[in-house]
Image (cartoon, rainbow, N blue to C red):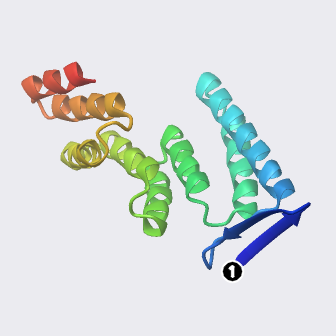
Amino acid sequence: SDGIWQEDKVSLSVSVPDGVQVLSGELYDRSRKIIEHAKHLIGRYTGTGQLRYLRLARETLREVLSLLPGDGDILNRFGQLEMLARDLHRAERYFNEVLKLDPKNLDARFSMGLLRLKQFRFEHARRIFETLAAEHPQKDKDLVYFNLGLAELAQGEIAAAKSYFRQA
């Protein structure tokens, strides 16, 4: 569908692919404020370990997901929250949901690599990070190489780990 906005001989035409939700300015602002609040709660949970912040962060993310159903960024944040809470199975479900919607989603792929490290699936983590490094050599290069180093170190590959840590 196409949307056209006009005011005083200034015209802006935006083409929106079918199936993409267009948010009003008010709804967009509200969802961004809720996301910022969720980030704050996640930080509080991480800093204190208090479960009430985990519960509140989950509730807050559910609220924004009700406004933006199927939003990959929100689903990825949910997965990251569950990974912090050590619910790795639930985190994996969220990351897989994002990747089902968008198999090239960098954040979800990176998060999945971190999840594989936490699951002691080091070979799989290494493959994910190697693919990310090859496809996007400039995007978060330091983090990718650092995590590659962790995967190699966990497998006892000291020389390879050192090489990756030097590149990070």
Q: Is residue 97 visible?
A: yes
Look at the picture and state if 54 lies above or below 124: above
Instruction: Give percent across and percent down for residue 118.
Output: 35, 40
Q: Residue at x 83, y 55 (%)?
A: 25
> In which quadrant of the rendered image does the C terminus lie?
top left
Is 55 left, or right, of 46 in this rendering? right
Label 1 packing within 10 angstroms: few (<14), some (14-19), many (20+): few
Instruction: Give percent across and percent down for residue 4.
Output: 78, 71
Tally of marks: 1
> In which quadrant of the rendered image does the N terminus lie?
bottom right
Q: As rendered, which of 150 and 90 lies closer to the eye? A: 150
Q: As rendered, which of 31 and 14 lies closer to the eye? A: 14
Instruction: Give percent across and percent down for residue 53.
Output: 70, 35
Look at the picture and state if 149 lies above or below 55: above
State which quadrant residue 18 falls in: bottom right
Q: Is residue 21 visible?
A: no
Instruction: Give percent across and percent down for residue 86.
Output: 48, 41
Residue tagged 1? 1
Q: As rendered, which of 4 and 41 lies closer to the eye? A: 4
Residue at the limit of the structure toward the right, as seen here: 8
Considering the numbered disc 1 on the image, is that residue within a helix, a strand or a loop?
loop
Q: As rendered, which of 139 and 116 lies closer to the eye? A: 139
Q: Residue at x 60, y 75 (%)?
A: 17
Is 21 left, or right, of 4 in this rendering? left
Q: Amino acid at mark 1?
A: Ser
Is 134 left, or right, of 98 in this rendering? left
State which quadrant residue 99 falls in: bottom left
Q: Residue at x 69, y 67 (%)?
A: 14
